[in-house]
Amino acid sequence: MNRQLNHLQTNSISHCQECGISQSACWILHNVRHKATFRRLCTNCVLKHNLSRFCPLCFDVYEDSTPPPSHHRVMCYRCPSISHLSCVSFRFSSTFLCPLCSDPRFVFFDGFDSGVSLRQSESTVAFLAGKNVDAKSGKAIVAAARVSAQSMRRAALDARAVAEMKIKNAAFAKKQATLALEQLAYLVLQEKDKNGYSKSNGDAVASERNVEEEEYKLHEKEVTAIFDL
């Protein structure tokens, strides 16, 4: 129930949980796991926090977060961004800077005019229907969506691994509890057998004593009878 509530609350968020930009200004908010929590982030924030997962020049997302071979890639001198060597072309140097590091004003998604905002009575779909997005921003949105999908897929795999580990731990604990109960039952049975042996042994000793007393009394009577003669 709590998970469903948290999921509904996350989907109801209408602004980026990192930079605070509204959905009407960033077109779309991506569901992504960031810093071990599930959050809704704009395109710019998703890409800024995953610079090593895509090429910032062509926005090609590396499959399974695996970058190109070392001889086909160029790393930014200041950040973990990884670009295709073919995309860098003539701009390549030993101190290559990605677009984000080379231009402080650079953004992956340019957004809409600052004067345009979403009216309360206007749906997001209707608002976005008449808006145009340039090619770079469109590629950035697609790249952020793919990076987010990878993040959620990894989160699902991690959750499955944790669940399987808990199942194994529970099965092991159950087995240990069963063994402990069996051991306890064995000790109880052993104690009962011991008490039963002691009781039967005591009864046998008492019976032998009674026989001896009876024989002594009988012998005493015989001796007395002889003297009386």
Image (spheres, rainbow, N blue to C red):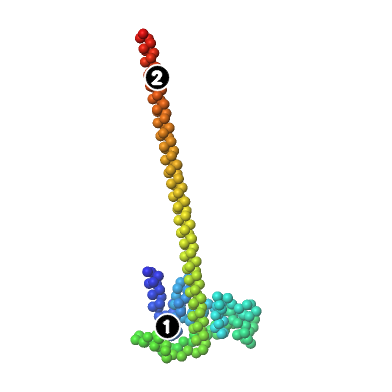
Q: Residue 195: image x %, image y %?
A: 42, 37
Q: How many marks?
A: 2
Q: Residue 212: image x %, image y %?
A: 41, 22
Give the camera-side residue of 90 and 190: 190
- At horizontal 63% and vertical 77% (from top left) the residue drawn is 70
- At horizontal 42% and vertical 88% (from top left) the residue drawn is 128
Q: Quadrant of residue 61?
A: bottom right
Mark 2 in CB contact with mark 1 (< 8 angstroms): no
| Residue type beneath disc 2 | Tyr
Question: Which residue carries the number 1 mark?
Answer: 23
Q: Residue 180: image x %, image y %?
A: 46, 50
- At horizontal 52% and vertical 87% (from top left) the residue drawn is 136
| Residue type beneath disc 1 | Gln
Q: Quadrant of residue 223?
A: top left
Please tell me which of labels 2 and 1 falls first in the chain. 1
- At horizontal 44% and vertical 85% (from top left) the residue drawn is 27
Marks 2 and 1 sit apart, C-alpha to C-alpha, by 111 Å
Residue 49 visible in image: no
In this rendering, position of residue 175 left or right of residue 75:
left
Discs 2/1, front: 2
Q: Quadrant of residue 229?
A: top left
Q: Secondary structure at mark 2?
A: helix
Residue 30 visible in image: yes
Question: Which residue carries the number 2 mark?
Answer: 216
